[in-house]
Amino acid sequence: MGMRIDILTLFPEVISAFCQASIVARAVSRGLVQIVATNLRGFATDAYGSVDDAPYGGGAGMVLMCQPVYDAVEAVRPQHPHPGKVVLLTPQGRRLDQALAAALAAEPRLILLAGHYEGFDERTRMGLADVEVSLGDFVLSGGEVAAMALIDAVVRLLPGALGQEASLHEESFSAGLLEYPQYTRPREFRGMVVPEVLLSGDHLRIAAWRTQQAELRTMQRRPDLWNKYAKDAGQTRDLSDAPPRTRRR
Ligand code: ADE
């Protein structure tokens, strides 16, 4: 059976549109993943469909109440044999990276909680969340974009989601390096030419050039990734061996 991803959100139509496009749609149609968006509003208990309220202690903004969130999780849980890990999307979570995406892709089921307003009631975190995930150190007005980024990063890692070529490509990033430069036709564009080696047909030289470029780029732009890569590779070189930082574009 494929993976199941539930998303509890106030904007299920946004998620549905996203899941009908691109690689995610293809993975869904291949049966690799089932994605179900559920509207939290459906779990409101009053006539206005309220899911949020003012914070105790005062202050600006509204807080997503526990009750609709707990009720929604408890309603979707029995819809699949695996209870699933509950993932809260919040700027206070663990930063999403390739390793976390890979770990989540190994789960049989995920239940994503996309918050809105000023955030979740603390008791939603305490009683419901298995893991809290952040897209980065910036504030989104809702968790939906973060949920979609997570879905995209996870689904493309499911076996069969990508073609052969693409999965090999994936490995280079998983090795912890930034991507090497890519070119396609024409050979010359507005005076900028394709590096000669790529036209040489010499696959060994091309592979060596690409590795070198990926390493160079990683050193120059992401010293944090570079040091980790160098260490993991059992190498002793670190930033002190890196060339001076060059102009960024
Ligand atoms: N919700 C609001 N901001 C977010 C962020 N940076 N990451 C994940 N979820 C969020």
Image (spheres, rainbow, N blue to C red):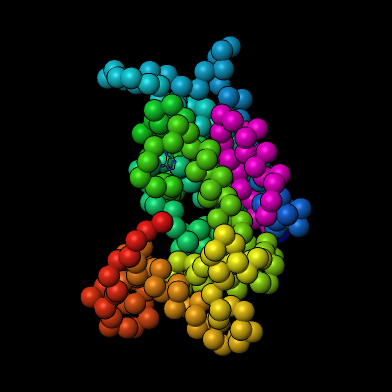
User: Left or right: where does residue 109 sit relative to residue 174?
Assistant: right
Q: Where is residue 221, by image quadrant?
A: bottom left
Residue 224 percent location from the top left of the image: 32, 64
Quarter of image, res 64: top left
Is 118 inside the magenta-drawn segment?
no
Q: Is residue 26 above or below residue 204?
A: above
> In the rendered image, is residue 137 in sight?
yes
- On the rendering, which quadrant does ligand 1 occupy? top left
From the top left corner, tell me how far across and down residue 160 is, in percent: 69, 65
- The image shows residue 180, relative to residue 146, as above or below, that is below
Task: Report the residue at 42% width, 19% height from top.
Answer: 53
User: Farthest residue toward the front?
Assistant: 191
Residue 164 at x, y percent in the picture: 68, 72
- 187, 116: nearer the viewer: 187
In the image, what residue occupies the spot 61% across and 25% down? 42
Tell me: 239 left or right of 127.
left
> In the image as oriented, which residue stretches furthest toward the top?
47
Viewer-proximal residue among 241 and 111: 241
* Residue stretch rendered in magenta on the structure: 2-23
At x 29% / y 74%, what residue is drawn?
243
Q: Quadrant of the N terminus?
A: bottom right
The x, y position of residue 97, in whole percent, is 44, 58
Image quadrant where residue 23 sits: bottom right
